[in-house]
Image (cartoon, rainbow, N blue to C red):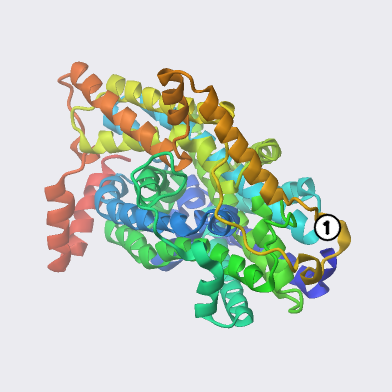
Amino acid sequence: MSSAFTVVDYIVFIGVVVISFAIGVYFAIVDKRKQTTSPEEYFLAGRKSKLLPVMFSYIVTFQSSILYLGFPAEGYIYGPMYAFYGLSKFITLLFTAYFIVPVFHPLKLTSIYEYLNLRYGDNVLRILAMTFGAVYQVFYMSTVTYGTCVALEVVMGIPYWITIILYTSVTAVYTSIGGIKAVIWTDVFQFVIMLTGFIAVFVKTTLVVGGFSDIIHYAGDRFTFMEFRFDPRIRLSFWNVTIGSLTSSLYFSYSQSAMQRVYTLPTVKSAKMMYLLSIPIYAPLMVIAVLEGGFIFAYYAFKGCDIFASGKVQNVNEIVPFAIIDIFQNQPGLPGLFIAALSAAAFSTLSSCLSSLSAIVYQDIIKVIRPDMTPEFSTTISRIVTLVFGVLALLVSFLLTSLPGSVIALFQRCVACMDGPTCAIFLLSAMFKRATTKGVLLGALCGSAVALWLNLGQLYSDLPKDPPLPPGPTYNCENNMTFNSEFDVPLTNTSAYEIWVNTNMSATNSVNESSNTVAESGLIQLYRTSFVLFSFVGFLVSILVAIPASLCTATNSTVDERCLFSFRKHVLKEECDDSRGSNHERDKIHAEDETSLM
């Protein structure tokens, strides 16, 4: 396979790495010349960023190898139902624009977790949410790095441990020296590269197969959106994906990476527009990523060789990179473009997470302990913290290499016990005036414990894997594949796919036979809950426990009204003001309110 990666491909790939690094160096030099080295400039670009670059940065930040590898792999193996995640994203982006931004932007914070101190007057929930957020982002970075490096090993033959070190080192360095400006403008560059990679796959596969109607014919079940059963045990259904993904999708709005971009924009209106303008790009991009798996399946069905069913690919995360090298082997530069696009996604996510983690540690820990530090020394400390988190992400990436499953399942399993309860903390704090520290804390801990219990129960109860869709043909595999034999998996009479399905069926029968009691059967059925619902379950438990617990522990203490959402003030009044063209006056009023917080 390595022979398919030409000199041109290496040039394209290395070019992306060099440009990304150069952008960080450029902004470090510019800031030094302008003598703008304050933490506000480093983390928030002086709160004067332009809307469009920040919007593209927001979109790219949460796209990565999870989108580039995980979504198409789900589409290839299990069908298109994960595309309904785009609908979930549409809902949460609208909710964020009208219900979250109007509350958080006027506070002019650096870390989103400062809000919890303002809301409750103590740091208990601030510390809990900050811990959840830091662990979440470390796992997110590590999953992204792992997925990307698996692809590089398949395509280029480079051992994953080398590329893990390369990616985390380059990203940590350019983020630490360039700050949020480097992150935003690198994201804009990387968005163009990512989009080009997607388009190339769709165009090439369609041309080879014969047209879109032929793609649909050969894809078969991979383009069938017909799973609407109300059954939480189904891996992917309309209800499981749409409802179950609401909290995991909404968590991104409550993450430091997203809120950091909100705070870089000068007004509430521009922050709203960032989310609203993201909708027609962000949600369809997720749908396109899932459908890409169907296009790749159709391509190989047309060729007569299902690469997963034949055993050519045994790790679902290798499907896309393996296919890219085969599909574009006669077009030098395009395989390199794909790896460049995948690298761009990884760099973007890593840099954004490192920047936000540095901001969290600075604002929520260092500044609390040492509030008298000079701006220059604070920025230096923040850069060191960025490098430290880069090393931590590297170590966790190596840990993830020992876990099975697609990068989507890996990521959602790792963070499900944190994102749902975190959403509950922030939603209750803003929407429920009688929420208390003790009540919300108890709810979040219970929600996290239940989600973790489901996760571990499914992981260690030896349940069968979810059955994939029927495989494609494999009659032409030996004649169809042209890679170097050192990368090929020898074909046997029984494929890896068949072994997998047979093992799962045997395991299913074994589980059913061993379920002799109603209690045991019920517990097993509970553990079969789809992984996409874990976050939502944690959220629901947190809400159901926190509300009565808050009512039982409610006090007469005054709540800062600026921390609470008001439909009349934040939706009706502001929208009326917008329609009357009174934005300038409203922002002036906001600015006066915000000054009192500084």
Rendered location of residue 537, percent (x, y): 37, 34
- Quarter containing the C terminus: top left
- Quarter containing the N terminus: bottom right
User: Of the residues shown, which amino acid type is indicated by label 1?
Assistant: Phe
Residue 457 visible here = yes
Residue at left 28%, top 24%?
545
Residue at left 50%, top 44%?
356
Q: On the rendered structure, is 16 left or right of 235?
A: right
Residue at left 23%, top 26%?
547
Q: On the rendered structure, is 202 left or right of 263?
A: right
Q: How many marks?
A: 1
| Above or below, comparing residue 357 to residue 12 in the picture | above
Between residue 233 and residue 380, name the one nearer to us.
233
Rendered location of residue 283, percent (x, y): 40, 61
Name which quarter of the figure residue 561 lies in. top left
| Above or below, comparing residue 469 to residue 233 in the picture | below
Rendered location of residue 363, percent (x, y): 46, 36
Residue indicated by mark 1: 487
Rendered location of residue 260, percent (x, y): 43, 49
Are there few (<14), some (14-19), or many (20+) residues within 10 Å of tag 1?
some
Q: Secondary structure at mark 1?
A: helix
Residue at left 51%, top 55%?
61
Residue 171 visible here = no
| Above or below, comparing residue 173 to residue 201 in the picture | above
Between residue 583 and residue 133, name the one nearer to us.
133
